[in-house]
Amino acid sequence: MKRLIGIFLLSLLFLDLRGQSADLQVLAKWMQGSFDSREQHLQDTSNYFDINLEIIPVWTDRVNGFWFYVEQAVSGNLEKPYRQRIYQLTENEKGVFESKIFLLKDPLRFAGRADLIEKLNPDSITEKEGCSVFLKRTDQNTFLGSTLGKNCPSERNGSNYATAEVKITATTLESWDRGFDENDKQVWGAESGAYIFRKK
């Protein structure tokens, strides 16, 4: 974990913001960092786990948006994250920010090792088509967004599609990921509302 934090701090020094809109720069800055849902878990242990979330800048020399390595793990089991992704954040339409989701091959080899991502060819990752999150800035303090309709396929727990609703501020990242079957019945994900991750 110390190595992961070290890579994050180093990446901040080299994050190239040239040519990007002010709002995209702000969103990228707010997204990155170390977060956890400990406070929410302590308030409602039956519905929310204590989850650790790391969002680390990678490939900072690229000019096609901002790239992040994302790692989620139960706080008591940080060495074995249950979700590892690559995000690409772009502004393809003025004021509309797209966070594309990419899958890694053999992801556990990257656990706690964001430095290994730097050596990875971006062509070797696979986009989760239909699963992009689209965000807009609603005021000076908030970005809101979601996936589109039923476009994100999912087979987890018998689901047919997945949705994500996201709220991002300078200090929090709220994410409500859910899966639904062909009859639009929820079959996985939090039922009471979004996970609230607070920046450490």
Image (tube, rainbow, N blue to C red):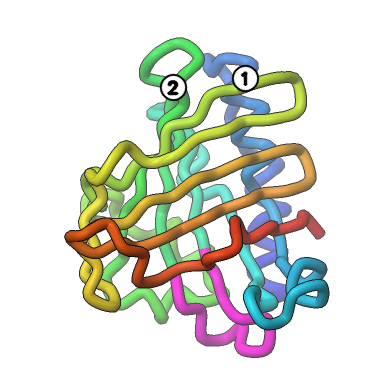
Amino acid marked by disc 2? Glu
User: x%, y% of residue 188?
Assistant: 39, 71
**Mark positioned earlier in the residue sequence (1 or 2):** 1
Q: Main secondary structure of the magenta part?
A: loop
Under tag 1, what secondary structure? Answer: helix
Q: Which of the numbered marks, if any, corresponds to residue 141?
A: none
Q: Image quadrant of residue 46?
A: bottom right
Pointer 1 with pointer 2, Cβ within 8 A: yes
User: Left of 11 or right of it: where is 115?
Assistant: left
Residue designated by label 2: 91
In this view, 193 is above or below 101: below
Q: Is residue 158 magenta?
A: no
Residue at left 81%, top 72%? Answer: 43
At label 1, the amino acid type is Asp
As for residue 80 lying within the magenta part, the answer is yes
Q: What residue appears at the point 21 percent right and 70 percent down from the top-left corner? A: 155
Tell whether 195 sits left or right of 171.
left
Bounds of the magenta segment: 71-83
Q: Quadrant of the N terminus?
A: bottom right
Instruction: Measure the C-alpha gap from mark 1 to mark 2.
Output: 9 Å
User: Between residues 171 and 157, which one lies in front from this camera angle?
Assistant: 157
- How many residues crowd around disc 2 within 10 Å: few (fewer than 14), some, or many (20 or more)? some
Q: Most extreme residue toward the top, as rendered?
A: 94
**Quarter containing the C terminus:** bottom right
**Residue for badge 1:** 23
Determine whether, in the image, residue 20 is placed left or right of residue 27.
left
Q: Which element type, helix, strand or loop, lies under badge 2?
A: strand
Viewer-closest of 39 and 84: 39
The image shows a total of numbered marks equal to 2
At which x and y percent is residue 8? 66, 56
Q: How packed is label 1: few (under 14 Cα within 10 Å), some, or many (20 or more)? A: some
